[in-house]
Image (cartoon, rainbow, N blue to C red):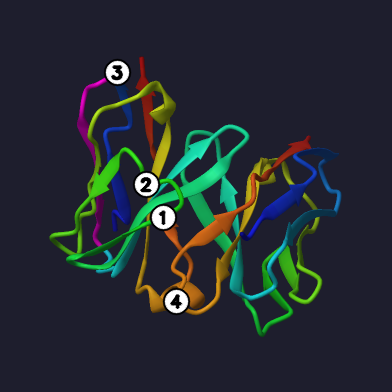
Amino acid sequence: KQEVTQIPAALSVPEGENLVLNCSFTDSAIYNLQWFRQDPGKGLTSLLLIQSSQREQTSGRLNASLDKSSGRSTLYIAASQPGDSATYLCAVTLGAGSYQLTFGKGTKLSVIP
Amino acid sequence: NAGVTQTPKFQVLKTGQSMTLQCAQDMNHEYMSWYRQDPGMGLRLIHYSVGAGITDQGEVPNGYNVSRSTTEDFPLRLLSAAPSQTSVYFCASSYSFRALYNSPLHFGNGTRLTVT
């Protein structure tokens, strides 16, 4: 059974710092990996999706990398801002014929002004 | 553009009561799904649908029923509510089930359900 782990569970940083969030998964036979953002009381918003054949994706100050063979992904946030405060979740889609995503439990990020 | 709309936002039920959580999307998405989110457990898939008339079970389907009579709607029914079903429920959709491999999921804002 695929398991997705996110470390740390919570992170607090001062504004302006660059930071890295980690995601690991146990079964490397994935189709893609997604990073989501969740604000309190809200649904999830997709930030970046990396196909299994890709190594990284970038959107603005966000950069996500994927090392499928080692079962790891990182989300890099440059020049953090208070508005980045949220919970960040990663999720993997398993191989052909699977229409399910397996989620990590998330990292709660607080950016202190 | 409304996206994925869930109703109600909040609901309190007594043990044994039944209810339906509504989910509608206006993006002509083939794939729709229901997740529950619990503290310390993360998001877990309840049921999903790859098109009208087609549904399948996810990781935690017991106690829930779904149907997909139209492309737009994917209601989740609790047959006899139990305190263990206290949770936040999210509906999510994607352009097609094949697009899960290269397109993101779109989530609703959730329904917070309490069963006493």
Label 3–label 2 contact, CB within 8 A: no
Q: Which residue is mark 4?
A: A97
Which image quarter: residue B33? bottom left
Q: Is residue A68 visible?
A: yes
Q: Callout 3: helix, strand or loop? A: loop
Q: Which residue is mark 3?
A: B15
Q: Residue at x 85, y 39 (%)?
A: A14
Which image quarter: residue A59? bottom right
Q: Callout 1: helix, strand or loop? A: loop
- When the figure is inspected, residue A12 is found, relative to residue B47, above or below; the finding is above
Separation (CA) of disc 2 from disc 4:
19 Å
Q: Residues within 10 Å of mark 1 (few under 14, many from 20)?
A: some
Separation (CA) of disc 3 from disc 2:
18 Å
Does B74 appear in magenta? no
Separation (CA) of disc 2 from disc 1:
6 Å
Label 3–label 4 contact, CB within 8 A: no
Depth order, front residue of A40/B17? B17
Q: Which residue is mark 1?
A: B58
Magenta span: chief secondary structure? strand
Viewport quadrant of the N terminus of chain A: bottom right
Q: Which residues are magenta?
A: B16-26
- State which tag comes first along the sequence, 1 or 3: 3
| Same subunit, tags 3 and 4 | no
Q: Callout 2: helix, strand or loop? A: loop
Q: Residue at x 52, y 61 (%)?
A: A101
- Percent position (x, y) of residue A84? 68, 46
- Percent position (x, y) of residue B80? 25, 28
